Amino acid sequence: MARNRQPVLKKCRALGIDPVILGVKKSSNRQIRPNANKKPTEYATQLREKQKAKFIYNVMEKQFRKIYEEAARKLGVTGLTLIEYLERRLENVVYRLGFAKTRRQARQIVSHGHIAVNGRRVNIASFRVKVGDIVSVIENSKNVELIKLAVEDATPPAWLELDRAAFSGKVLQNPTKDDLDFDLNESLIVEFYSR
């Protein structure tokens, strides 16, 4: 399986992302690159926005393209549907509920089998949850220190409901662009793929 092993701070600096969005509490002391003052082309801005979304949601190109194509086939605004599909991925829901400090940690928690959806263990990070689904930590994993510490600081968005005592959460509604904790111009991604 292909994995993204790039240095987080280096990639954040290149894409202009605040590392706090990814759950990283560090900052880089490096200066801005010399060509950073050049005006980027239209293609460059579209590419950067796509790369930013891929990096934040920890998705490789092939999978990101499939998600985009599925969003394009659905009725409605393609960009908003794309955001909804990315937000509804199980690894992201686990991160948003506060069972993990970062999306990468959430992916590992899911793949190691610590999470159940509607009572059934799911270890696929790309599993897409639906409205009404209950995402919970399995009984044996409730005393894992990483999960305990993460849940204490959790503040889930409005589309999710968290039950700290039971280590579970419920999907109340589909996420919207307003629920994002970072800036993402989804129309640039749609323009990039519709060239």
Image (spheres, rainbow, N blue to C red):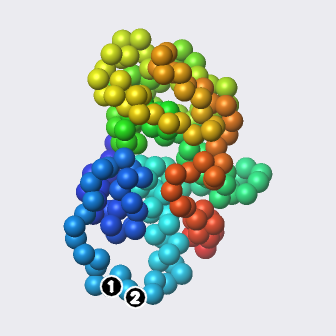
Residue at coordinates 41% horizontally, 33% vertically from top-left? 153
Residue 124 placement (x, y as % from top left): 45, 31
The 10 Å Cα crowd at callout 1, few under 14, some 14 to 19, many 20 or more, is few
Q: Nearer the viewer, residue 41 or 134?
A: 134
Say what amino acid the circle numbered 2 marks.
Answer: Lys
Image location of residue 10, percent across then percent down: 27, 63
Q: Residue reaching furthest top?
A: 139
Percent coordinates x, y for residue 14 in the rendering? 34, 69
Mark-to-mark CA distance, 2 and 1: 6 Å
Quadrant into which the N terminus falls: top left
- Residue that appears at 40% across and 68% down: 16
For the C terminus, give its image quadrant: bottom right
Is residue 103 visible in the rendered image? The answer is: yes
In the rendered view, tell whether residue 26 sits above or below residue 114: below
> Residue at left 33%, top 16%?
143
Indicate the quadrant where residue 26 lies: bottom left
Residue 148 is marked as none
Q: Which mark is residue 38?
A: 2
Amino acid type, residue under disc 1 in the picture: Asn
Helix or strand or loop: what does disc 2 sit on? loop
Helix, strand or loop status at disc 1: helix
- Using the image, determine if residue 142 lies above or below residue 135: above
Q: Furthest-bottom residue in view? A: 38
Name the outermost residue toward the left. Answer: 29
Cβ atoms under marks 2 and 1 closer than 8 Å: yes
The residue sitting at 59% across, 29% down in the picture is: 161
Residue where numbered disc 1 is placed? 35
